[in-house]
Image: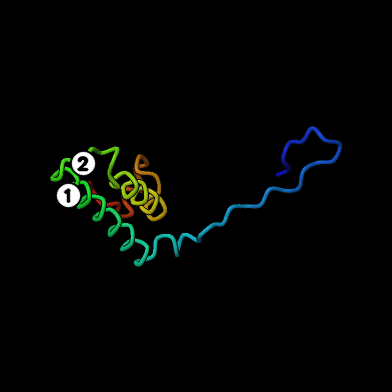
């Protein structure tokens, strides 16, 4: 892939993003990490609700984002039926 350039010489090739092999992305350790981050997000939301901390002011959003990213790596997109067969936990 070559970046678009208005200059006379083409831009350098864009670097390819770092990719994790599927065997590692869905390893038991990665699944445990995804589960732990999701559990932390759930616990954080409960704590923030208990303390009356507005959602936009707490850290729950960050933890939920990290959990979603980890779950995406392990299980793939949530809205694709075949990925739910790979063991995506129900929320």
Task: Examine the rendered structure and indicate whether residue 35 appears above or below residue 10.
Answer: below
Residue drawn at (77%, 43%) of the image: 11
Residue that lies at the very extreme toward the bottom in this rendered image: 29
Numbered mark located on residue 65 in the image: none
Task: Examine the rendered structure and indicate whether residue 79 appears above or below residue 20.
Answer: above
Q: Which residue is mark 1?
A: 47
SS assignment at label 1: helix
Task: State which tag comes first along the sequence, 2 or 1.
Answer: 1
Label 2 crowd (10 A; few <14 / some 14-19 / many >=20): few
The N terminus lies in which quarter of the figure? top right
Q: Nearer the viewer, residue 50 or 8?
A: 50
Q: Nearer the viewer, residue 30 or 57?
A: 57
Where residue 52 sits, quadrant-wise, is: top left
Label 1 crowd (10 A; few <14 / some 14-19 / many >=20): some
CB within 8 Å, label 2 to label 1: no
Q: Position of residue 78 (x, y in %)?
A: 35, 43
Q: Position of residue 22 (x, y in %)?
A: 46, 59
- Nearer the camera: disc 2 or disc 1: 2
Q: Position of residue 49 (x, y in %)?
A: 16, 42
Q: Nearer the viewer, residue 8 or 90?
A: 8
Residue drawn at (40%, 60%) of the image: 26
For the residues labelled 2 and 1, the Cα–Cα distance comes to 9 Å
SS assignment at label 2: loop
Q: Which residue is mark 2?
A: 53
Q: Is residue 91 left or right of residue 10?
A: left
Where residue 81 sits, quadrant-wise, is: top left
Residue drawn at (28%, 60%) of the image: 36
Residue that lies at the very extreme toward the top in this rendered image: 6
Residue drawn at (45%, 64%) of the image: 23
Q: Position of residue 28 (x, y in %)?
A: 34, 66
Q: Is residue 35 left or right of residue 51?
A: right
Residue that lies at the very extreme toward the right in this rendered image: 8
């Amino acid at each position: 892939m070559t970046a678009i350039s208005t200059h006379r010489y083409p831009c350098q090739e864009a670097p390819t993003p770092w990719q994790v092999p599927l065997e590692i992305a869905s390893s038991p350790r990665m699944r445990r990490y995804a589960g732990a981050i999701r559990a932390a997000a759930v616990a954080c939301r409960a704590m923030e609700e208990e303390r009356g901390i507005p959602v936009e002011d707490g850290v729950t959003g960050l933890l939920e984002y990290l959990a979603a990213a980890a779950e995406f790596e392990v299980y793939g997109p949530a809205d694709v039926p075949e990925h739910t067969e790979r063991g995506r936990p129900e929320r």
